[in-house]
Image: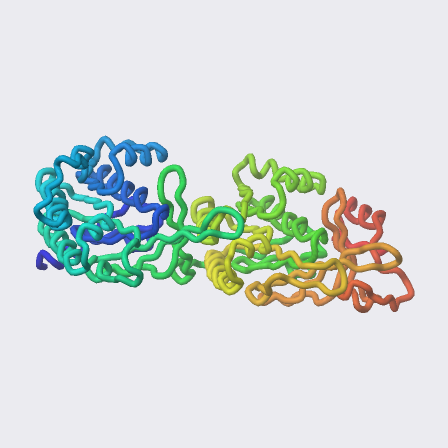
Amino acid sequence: MDKTASAETHRIPTGIEGLDHILGGGVTANRLYLVEGTPGTGKTTFSLQFLLEGARRGEPGLYVTLSETEGELRAVAGTHGWSLDGLELFELVPEAGLDPELEQTLLHPSEVELGETVRGVMERVEALKPKRVVLDSLSELRLLAQNPLRYRRQILALKHFFASRDCTVLVLDDRTGEPGDLQLHSIAHGVISLDQTPTGFGAERRRLRVIKMRGIKYSGGYHDMSIITGGVCVYPRLIAADHPGMVSGQMLGTGVDGLDALLGGGLVPGTTTLLSGPAGVGKTTAAVRCMVSALAQGERAAFFLFDERLPTLMIRSAALNMDLRPFIESGHLKIRQIDPAELSPGEFATAVRNAVEHDGAKVIVVDSLNAYLQAMPEDRHLTLQMHELLSYLGQQGVYTLMILGQHGLVGDIRSDVDLSYLADTVLLLRFFEAHGEVRKAISVVKTRTTDHERTIREFRVDGGGLSIGSPLREFQGILTGVPSYKGASGPLMNPEAAAHALGEGSDGVGNG
């Protein structure tokens, strides 16, 4: 194998979480790469992580700065808890070089300064022989060059110089050049773009995109990223086909016989159940009931809470005979409170993957999709991301429960987005009025895996938990909210009948 082919197969990690996964292991060594982005997108933090990863591997690193001082770089590193003592920081234009008395006047300043700048970089590299180099930034070279031809020639000269020195180079660019100028893209071996987009409310959305990478199969498109204490984190776009799995397990009972009857026996592994209905109808309670049943059977679960406050969920669940604290203390249940204004969809998908792959969660609950929708700029993006996420969870054999709140209480009920076609099972929960009281009804309108019951049943939520009544065969128009009663006897549940059924350990079916 020749030396060129060998170099193409030698990868080095960037040290940036998620990016190496996108690149299939890292970047090709001894090449020049362009990292571009407007000011504030994280280029400096990105490049410092790259050098620090090299230092951890015993590779000398050099940071050449034309725009920031050494003090500023150390201050940036300090905010992340990093020490730059193992790296060489070189200010190409030190303060002494700014003395007006040292300026010459015989030649155009750009002709001398550009040549001196490039020569200064080369001399420093020759003296230190680093394995990783960062040049920050090209905007200063562009200003010194005065015209595109000289600028391109100097960049090509630097590229050829570095190619013969066995070092991997990142050059940073802040996009202050002419719009649409792609000369750097054609010269660089690879191009990584960093973006940030302001939102109407909450933190800006940060994204990364690999525009070009010669000789490497990478994951294209935009990938969400964030800058936290500790550096840049990239959240690779989830592609379900990259994570094949084997669906195993048995049907999971919900702990309520009437609900199991509606579902055709319970929840099937690798399926998604959507609980849809207006606010306050009992969607979260039904989801928690299913989750607690799985936890009682030794499974692990992860609850992603968007809407409700965690203390409220804990208190309410305990009051309904579904205390979650023992499962949290044992480590079988992890509940994550999520602020949709601060969390990007890519970060959420990564959190779900970590719950499944690292924590062993077999039950995932998302409460609710409405808040998740607010984190997305467009509905079609939500649908595509949810399709990939649900496909991934299905391939891993996970029991997925999603809650979708609907507008309205009775009558005309609407949703922000229709995701029912993505779900394997759809549970419809409704309010209805009968005999001067507001009642609740539940039905399964769709399931792909079992022969489910097609009736509509009443259900109650009280101190004993969730109980399901008999099919409401004497009513018509229950799902409209204002049904008409056609029977001779009252089929509705009453508190005494429900309490009696629960007390005797029956199937929770009561006739009032």
- Quadrant that contains the C terminus: bottom right
Query: Can residue 402 be seen?
Result: no
Q: Nearer the viewer, residue 86 or 101?
A: 101
Identify the image quadrant of residue 436: bottom right
Q: Nearer the viewer, residue 177 or 433?
A: 177
- Quadrant that contains the N terminus: bottom left
Position of residue 290 measured from the top left corner of the image (x, y, whole percent): 63, 51
| 94 on left or right of 472 | left
Query: Can residue 459 be seen?
Result: yes
Could you tell me which residue is drawn at 52 percent across and 38 percent down? 331
Position of residue 109 measured from the top left corner of the image (x, y, whole percent): 14, 47
Could you tell me which residue is drawn at 74 percent across and 51 percent down? 467
| 4 on left or right of 328 | left
Q: Nearer the viewer, residue 95 or 221?
A: 95
Could you tell me which residue is drawn at 29 percent across and 35 percent down? 72
| 100 on left or right of 280 | left
Position of residue 254 measured from the top left corner of the image (x, y, whole percent): 64, 52
Vertical placement of 227 versus 281: above or below?
A: above
Could you tell me which residue is drawn at 78 percent across and 55 percent down? 509
Number of labels in the image equals 0
